[in-house]
Amino acid sequence: MVNVGILGATGMVGQRFIELLGDHPDFEITALTASMRSAGKKYEDAVTWYLDSKIPEVARDITVVDTDPGEVKDVDIVFSALPANIAAVVEPQFAEAGMIVASNASAMRMEPDVPLVIPEVNPEHLELVEMQQKNRGWDGFIVTNPNCSTIALTMTLKPLYDNYDLQRVYVSTMQAVSGAGYDGVPSMAIVDNLVPFIGEEEEKMETETLQLLGDLEEGNLNPASFGVSASCHRVAVLDGHTEAVFIQMEEDFQVEDVEETFREFKGLPQKLDLFSAPAAPIIVREEDNRPQPRMDRNAERGMAVSVGRVRKDEVFAKCLKYVLVGHNTIRGAAGASILNAELITEIM
Amino acid sequence: MVNVGILGATGMVGQRFIELLGDHPDFEITALTASMRSAGKKYEDAVTWYLDSKIPEVARDITVVDTDPGEVKDVDIVFSALPANIAAVVEPQFAEAGMIVASNASAMRMEPDVPLVIPEVNPEHLELVEMQQKNRGWDGFIVTNPNCSTIALTMTLKPLYDNYDLQRVYVSTMQAVSGAGYDGVPSMAIVDNLVPFIGEEEEKMETETLQLLGDLEEGNLNPASFGVSASCHRVAVLDGHTEAVFIQMEEDFQVEDVEETFREFKGLPQKLDLFSAPAAPIIVREEDNRPQPRMDRNAERGMAVSVGRVRKDEVFAKCLKYVLVGHNTIRGAAGASILNAELITEIM
Amino acid sequence: MVNVGILGATGMVGQRFIELLGDHPDFEITALTASMRSAGKKYEDAVTWYLDSKIPEVARDITVVDTDPGEVKDVDIVFSALPANIAAVVEPQFAEAGMIVASNASAMRMEPDVPLVIPEVNPEHLELVEMQQKNRGWDGFIVTNPNCSTIALTMTLKPLYDNYDLQRVYVSTMQAVSGAGYDGVPSMAIVDNLVPFIGEEEEKMETETLQLLGDLEEGNLNPASFGVSASCHRVAVLDGHTEAVFIQMEEDFQVEDVEETFREFKGLPQKLDLFSAPAAPIIVREEDNRPQPRMDRNAERGMAVSVGRVRKDEVFAKCLKYVLVGHNTIRGAAGASILNAELITEIM
Amino acid sequence: MVNVGILGATGMVGQRFIELLGDHPDFEITALTASMRSAGKKYEDAVTWYLDSKIPEVARDITVVDTDPGEVKDVDIVFSALPANIAAVVEPQFAEAGMIVASNASAMRMEPDVPLVIPEVNPEHLELVEMQQKNRGWDGFIVTNPNCSTIALTMTLKPLYDNYDLQRVYVSTMQAVSGAGYDGVPSMAIVDNLVPFIGEEEEKMETETLQLLGDLEEGNLNPASFGVSASCHRVAVLDGHTEAVFIQMEEDFQVEDVEETFREFKGLPQKLDLFSAPAAPIIVREEDNRPQPRMDRNAERGMAVSVGRVRKDEVFAKCLKYVLVGHNTIRGAAGASILNAELITEIM
């Protein structure tokens, strides 16, 4: 068993880490950190548990410590569910102290020597780790996963990008409130309403996607060169981001071929049979009104992306449209970091 | 006062007609029709009133009749809130009987001699009426308004189309449940969920928009030639459709100019100062999180479209993005037909 | 394995039966019935599956038959998820044909020779079966479970009734929309709203509760003699009924004792360790804001009732108050019938 | 015109005060206070306006000042929408400075010389003002209105109390999220959920109700002597509190008589024809599924309480049940204080 810690263990994503790691066959939770207000308390006393599962036994009695590498002993991997501003300061300290940091925070994603990885999409970017350790003189290192909306989108773009010439991608999201944290969206803002704005989300989708699909050449990342344009919106859904995708293709295509491309897609986690890997990363729904967040977010324990309404635009011959749903706090956050860690443990 | 009737007066849109016409200065409700189940009853006994206003006094005691021109006496204009399949049969009968039919139904929209009109966008298409009456030997005639999502979109496209070269429009909607009628969307389908499909809605948006912006040449309509691609979704909002719009422009543009173009836009209803015309058809919101359906649907008594988040895409220089909100059962349905009737009464 | 069938297998409660029986150790689904529209189709083609689990493998390929005992072969127990008016006609036919009918329908609940049973509350009422078979000349028999709201309430009243003198019970419910069936509550009725009426629900709570707690003497049921007064309301919750209970007690009491009484309560299903029996029928929550339907409805796979906010009224010394949550389509419907069948199989 | 100020003008209730006073015939808004963060800004720049109406013109340009009587000049009446802890300190300062404080805060409600008033219920309690001024040596004075849930309940209890002997009242509330302030209830807590707890709400309902219906004898208030027992719950409704009321009566009664008692009820505001007074304080709905918060909260511009489902309990002959809806931030907060001020202006 690998000892793991969770940084920021009392928040929404922190709780998902604990839920997912509670019965993990290879990782054992041995450290939990939170803000100073919680430090010193047993986890079950420090947390207001928001999930409808129970707090895993293994975590209940762990004494929460301050988010400081000096407080986290005998741990090999830390999962970071920290806010970006704190992550920017603290994650390097943990890497310097020799730990592997599998981070869901955005702080380090755009550092040129920090890999931003989805295991099914760009596992080869992990080779940046070597440069990172050399550059920074760290014994440990940081690996990040993308923003929740980006992960679901990019998982579906990967097989298309490998098989078609994409010209431009337009994506309109309908995102769940859990993405903003438990207190992030007041009910007054979302009952009988939606909010057509999520701070910095569109920028992340537009840059991270291209970076994930980019090529690494001698330590330099060349982003993919098609365009991505995003419009992000918050709707009255608890978990599960829905995205309407329009892709202007360079050439004509058949809808059946696209569906087949989605269905056949497998990545390294599937080949290596990693514990958290979904059997199929992409599930293609045939019904005309699916995927739906409440019905499809938990597919493959929340780790698969469901795609449906794959269609060719009636007006523009070369425009592909589809709708996707992915679980934002599992596949789009905690599960993404865990899958990164499983991959690292397996291949590095 | 012009005597008016409402066909399909007990449904969702029928009720909006009555609410809006209850205190109209020029139109007086004198006839209400519904299915045979309701015929013979006083309106207040026939209807389950779904709006949070009161039933207007003028309508309460009207005896509902069957939807048959023989039952509707001394009426000049009928407003149709009928289902498409019934409208296809009945609206021509009313026109033949000499009445003006201002219809919200989709049945006749694509007939080449039936004008599909938004008064701010293409009032000149009303000249088709002459051909319609001649072709069909009718004393009355039918005028239609577009689908709810199309109206809001096209009102914002009109000033852009007049001032810029549009290449392609991608639109992703987040539509209110009232658009499906009172019983249309079960709560089990929409609480903590959304439904990424609305039957025939995308097709309507993709064809009606181009027809509305098309040119009439010697009785032939040449649709506008840019592309429109729609993806339509139902969300947990009672009233007010929200649409995320991406426009691939032919040339570069300034966001400020686009906003100014929206703000300055006036149509014939504004020039003629029609009773139901909003002072400004398009309201530009400056806040980064507006428009929102609950906050903006009732702008200008539900007759204006609110636009916000006007921005230039960071990745594609020529891509314009914005979000709009329009009231689907007022500006997108009953109010649209009423404004058509006001325009007809004024200019024909 | 006992072969079982489900009557009304395509509806909301029918689906829950299939979900719960999909991996049952003692019952094997071998027959599914539905309306004639579905008869002849494979179940997976006949049903629009509303649950977020998958259709169990065992049910997918079963050919749906008409709800007629002649169509249901080699089955020992049928579970009835039929509407009351159909159940009234059909359930006796199945019993006459020699099958055990474990019914969730209300049709036969008030027949003097049909047991209305919650296994934790009044298993001894099953002795009515003998009279039923004799009276009616049936080889099979019918056993019913109460209305969803009644089950949750009565499970909490049982230990109180056994330990205290109850004078009057006032209960105000906040019920989930799934209780009305998939199409039962339009979203227009419940978004930003609630509906303070559920047809016949109050009457059922007020009579069934007393019957369940009543004594059987020589085949005659003497209902319990305290009063029950209910007010029933529908709120925007998918699953899980919440009930605010006020009990006017005959004598003073201690809150701690009441909580202890709840915690210690075990019934026959717990003693017999029936498969669907919750370890504890009543879970006592200590938090000041629990139970909540989304958080607590699935406790013990939906078979336990969660109780919280147990308190003594500050004004009336003898008034006990608490809030309970129970899963309406599991513990309150399909799970209730299944537990009845498990009990029957074990003891009769 | 009387010059009025609003203390705590940027919050939820503060905004309602401004909305309601925007076109008041007798009161003119001339001062607005808020926390120091807002002081010095124009109101329209200081506020995030949450209502779907526009900010009234009169308020837009007022410069917000600190909540300090020294900053509020030439004002006769201040309306307080302050949090209780601030109100406790600041309201006495404003009264001492000679102003009339019409407060919605709970801080001073239980002071023996501060009247807690609903104009339709206990206008005579205003005579405590004289004692208050004498006791405290103030030129101004404080008048409070009750908690939002209490107001709606007590308005319906008043005519019953005058005409029947009430023994015990049990009330279960389903309260709107706006009652907790804009940020008070996270969407994660209320989508597909409800929260069966509102801090101190039950205590307020149980004490304030009896105080409002109490008799003032020589400056001493004798609370009414029947019992009130409350259970309070938050549901996914934006505005409008719903309450299920059970009343154990001393004697038998007729439902029709109770309805008539509700309908005939008028208070002093109706007799004096105060500007904000509803024509009828209580509206009796006949439909079996009303009142509903979305449909009935705005009755009489939000100032009337709607009552429905008036019925006699089938089990207990002397138990009366009904459901009520009142607008929590209008009749239950800002409108209540304004009506108090109108009454004071008229009679004192």
Image (tube, coloured by chain):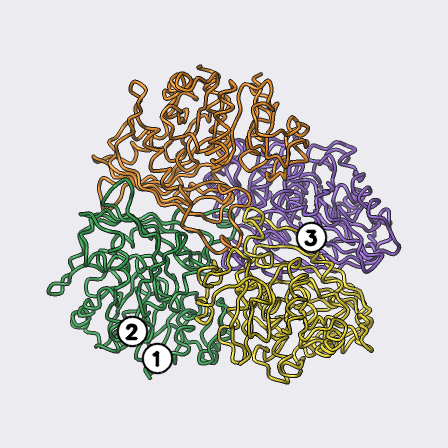
Chain colours: A orange, B green, C purple, D yellow
State which tag comes first along the sequence, 1 or 2: 1
Question: The disc labelled 2 sits on which kind of residue?
Answer: Ala
Q: Where does residue C184 sit, x and y in percent of width and height?
A: 54, 55
Q: Dot 1, how many residues are within 10 Å of its Cα: few (below 14), some (14-19), or many (20+)?
A: some
Q: Where does residue D228 sit, x and y in percent of width and height?
A: 77, 63
Pick the front one: B164 or C334: B164
To which residue does mark 3 refer?
A: C243
Residue found farthest to the right: C251
Residue found farthest to the front: D70
To which residue does mark 2 refer?
A: B341
Tag 1–tag 3 contact (CB < 8 Å):
no
Q: Quadrant of the N terminus of chain C?
A: top right
The residues bearing labels 1 and 3 have C-alpha atoms spaced at a distance of 50 Å
Same chain assignment for discs 2 and 3: no
Q: Quadrant of the C terminus of chain C?
A: top right
Under circle 1, the secondary element is strand
Q: Chain of mark 2?
A: B
Residue C130 makes an appearance in the image? no
Same chain assignment for discs 1 and 3: no
Q: Chain of mark 3?
A: C
Indicate the quadrant where residue A51 lies: top right
Pick the front one: A43 or D237: A43
Question: Does residue A103 sit above or below A204 in this rendering?
Answer: above
To which residue does mark 1 refer?
A: B27
